């Protein structure tokens, strides 16, 4: 290595040493400016109109209407109830229980659908045994269990109607649930109302924006 090349290298090292503090200072100032921009308290909100109440935001985040998954043909329900000799009624209640209990209503189904199904099964079992053995005592018990199961199913149907009525009111759906329809048509009427809930979208309510008092401007 010649003396000229060594001198040029030493000169470049001295220049780099003089520039290093300046570059470090410039980098620090740039980082401070970036952090100040990120934490600017006077920056406008990203989406001021996107504020919804808890119920509205839940529906807004949902990709689809939850009632849509429970849509069924009422005629198919009638046919299944006829083929199963009424056993499909408690089965329908059990299959809808998870959906209904997930709704934000004060009342829940709890064990009602399961007890109703057990009463139907007990009725069929007692009727078969009593008919085969010609035992009038067993048939009498079967009638009592059948009446109790029918009353329990009716109570469960009205519980479903109350849950749907509460959900429709909460989500702004102008849908009514008739007690007369629930009494005479049972699960067929309830399935019809669930289908209506799938057809009608919820009405969202936006939060009222807070009024910010502007600072008084001094007049000169």
Image (cartoon, grey):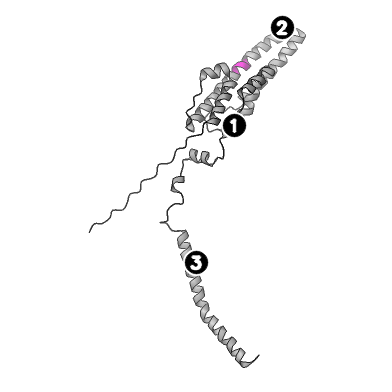
Residue that mark 1 sits on = 99
Please say whether residue 116 is visible from this viewpoint: no
Tell me if label 1 and label 3 are in contact, CB under 8 Å: no
Residue 135 falls left or right of residue 216: right
Mark closer to the chain start, 1 or 2? 1
**In the figure, 57 relative to 134: above or below?**
below
Residue 209 falls left or right of residue 120: left
Residue that mark 3 sits on = 31
Residue that mark 2 sits on = 136
The residue drawn where x is 61% and y is 23% is: 74
Distance of label 1 from label 2 (alpha carbons):
42 Å
**In the figure, 206 relative to 187: above or below?**
below
Which span of residues is magenta-colored? Answer: 148-152
Residue 52: mark? none
Mark 3 lies on a secondary structure that is: helix
> From the viewer's perspective, is the residue at label 2 or at label 3 nearer?
3
Task: Write down the quadrant of residue 76 in the picture.
Answer: top right
Mark 1 lies on a secondary structure that is: helix
The C terminus: image quadrant: bottom left
Tell me if label 2 and label 3 are in contact, CB under 8 Å: no
Q: Position of residue 156 (x, y in %)?
A: 58, 22
Q: Position of residue 45 (x, y in %)?
A: 44, 52
Q: Position of residue 16 (x, y in %)?
A: 55, 81
């Amino acid at each position: 290595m010649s003396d000229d090349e060594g001198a040029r290298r030493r000169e470049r090292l001295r220049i780099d040493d003089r520039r290093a503090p300046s570059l470090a200072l410039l980098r620090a100032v740039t980082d401070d400016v970036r952090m100040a921009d990120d934490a600017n308290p006077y920056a406008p909100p990203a989406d001021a109109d996107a504020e919804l109440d808890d119920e509205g935001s839940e529906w807004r985040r949902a990709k689809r209407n939850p009632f849509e998954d429970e849509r069924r043909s009422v005629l198919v329900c009638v046919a299944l109830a006829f083929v199963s000799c009424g056993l499909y009624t408690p089965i329908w209640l059990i299959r809808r229980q998870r959906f209904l209990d997930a709704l934000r209503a004060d009342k829940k189904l709890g064990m009602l659908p399961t007890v109703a199904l057990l009463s139907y099964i007990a009725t069929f079992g007692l009727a078969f045994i009593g008919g085969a053995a010609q035992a009038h005592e067993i048939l009498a018990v079967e009638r009592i269990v059948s009446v109790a199961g029918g009353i329990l199913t009716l109570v469960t149907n009205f519980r479903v109607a109350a849950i749907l009525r509460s959900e429709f009111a909460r989500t702004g759906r102008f849908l009514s649930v008739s007690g007369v329809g629930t009494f005479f048509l049972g699960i067929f009427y309830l399935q019809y109302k669930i289908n209506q809930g799938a057809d009608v979208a919820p009405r969202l309510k936006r939060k009222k924006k807070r009024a910010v008092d502007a600072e008084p401007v001094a007049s000169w």
